[in-house]
Amino acid sequence: MADDTASMSIYRASRTIKRKQSSMFNSLSSIHEDSIFVSEIAQLWPELPLVANLRCGLWYAKKLHSSCYFKSTDGHTNNLSFNTSRLNLHVASLAGQRGGCMIVDSTRKGKRFPDIANIVEKDRVFRSQRGQNAPQVSVKPKKSNQSQDQPLDIIVQNGISGDLLDSEHEDSKFDRFSLQRNLPSALNFAELHLKKGKRLAVCCNSGEDISVCICLAILISLYNVEGAYDDGRFFKKARVTKLDMRQRLVFVCKYIVNARPSRGNIKQVYNFLAGQSLLN
C-alpha cells in the first residue's frame, strides 16, 4: 500500500482526494450549512422575497417566494444577452415591486460567482457586496382593456368538446414530434373562435412550456407584426425566420413572465410554421 501511494501520480492523488471530498455525507453537510447561511441572510432583510434559481437553488430554503431559471450560458464574460426562451422577466417585475429580491443559487468550487450573478451589472455587484444602495427600478402592472364578461374558449393539454380543445402532448424528450402533430388542430380551433371575436385561454400542466409554444404559433400564424389579428393574411405572404420566432417569443414573455419553453418544443413550432410558409 505504501509503495502504491509513493508511486501514485499527482493527478491520481488529486482525483482520489476529490472523490473523498464529494462523498454523500460531505455534500449533504455542505447543503445544510449553506441553508443556515441563507436563513440568516433572509432574516436580515425579511422584506425581500427569496427566489430560487432552478434547480439546486431549491435545496437551500424551506420557504421561497418564486423560482427563476438562469443557466451558465447566460451572461458569460462580455456577453450581456439573454436566451429568449428564459427571459425571467418576473424576477425584474418582482424586484421592482418589492425594492429588490434575493436569488439563491450555488456554484462549483473555484467559480467567483454562480450562474445568476454573472448576469448582474458589475456596479450593482460592487455596491451590494459593500452594503451600499443600488438603483432600483419601478414596475407598475398594466391595466387590461379586455372585458371580463367576454366569452372564453380554452385550449388545454391532454378531443374537442364544445368550446374546449383537449390535446395530447408528450414532452419533447420522449416524443420529438408530439407538439408538431397537434399544432394543426390547435391552430384551427384558435382561428375558428378568434374569427368570432372570442378570447382564448391556452393551458398546460406547468404554464411554462407547451402552452407558451402554442401561443407563439397562434401569434405568428394568425396575427401581423403589429400584433393585430388578420386571419393569417400576413403569415401567408411572409416566410417565418428564426428571428421572427425570437421577436414574437419576447412579446409572449411580456405577458407570460414565467415562460420557459424547451428547445425541443420551440424547434417543433419553427419546423411546423416554416413548412406552412413554404406551402403558402
Image (cartoon, grey):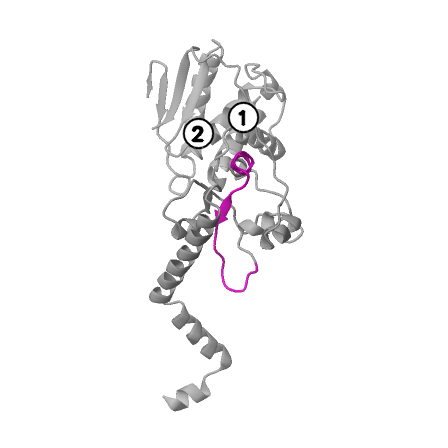
Residue position marked by numbered label 1 in the rendering = 141
Q: Residue at x 48, y 16 (%)?
A: 191
Say whether residue 100 is magenta: yes
Query: How many dots with numbers?
Result: 2
Please name which of the two marks, 1 or 2, marks the residue nearer to the observer: 1
Residue neighbourhood size for the residue with mark 1, other residues' Cα within 10 Å, grouped as few (<14), some (14–19), many (≥20) = few
Is 280 placed above or below 117 here? above
Q: Quadrant of the C terminus?
A: top right
Q: Are marks 1 and 2 in contact (CB under 8 Å)?
A: no
Percent coordinates x, y for residue 187 in the rendering: 46, 21
Percent coordinates x, y for residue 278 in the rendering: 58, 26
Query: What residue type is disc 1 on?
Result: Pro
Say whether residue 54 is magenta: no
Residue position marked by numbered label 2 in the rendering = 211
As rendered, which of 250 and 243 lies closer to the eye?
Answer: 250
Residue neighbourhood size for the residue with mark 2, other residues' Cα within 10 Å, grouped as few (<14), some (14–19), many (≥20) = many
Q: Quadrant of the N terminus?
A: bottom left
Q: Residue at x 57, y 25 (%)?
A: 277
Q: What residue occupies the far front of the structure in this picture?
A: 44
Q: Can residue 50 be seen?
A: yes
Secondary structure at badge 2 equals: helix
The magenta stretch is 92-112
The quarter of the picture where residue 30 lies is bottom left
The quarter of the picture where residue 186 lies is top left
The quarter of the picture where residue 221 lies is top right
Q: What residue occupies the far bottom of the structure in this picture?
A: 3
Secondary structure at badge 1 equals: loop
Q: Earlier in the sequence, mark 1 or mark 2?
A: 1
Q: What residue occupies the far top of the structure in this picture?
A: 196
Is 23 placed above or below 6 here? above
CA separation in Å, label 1 and label 2: 22 Å
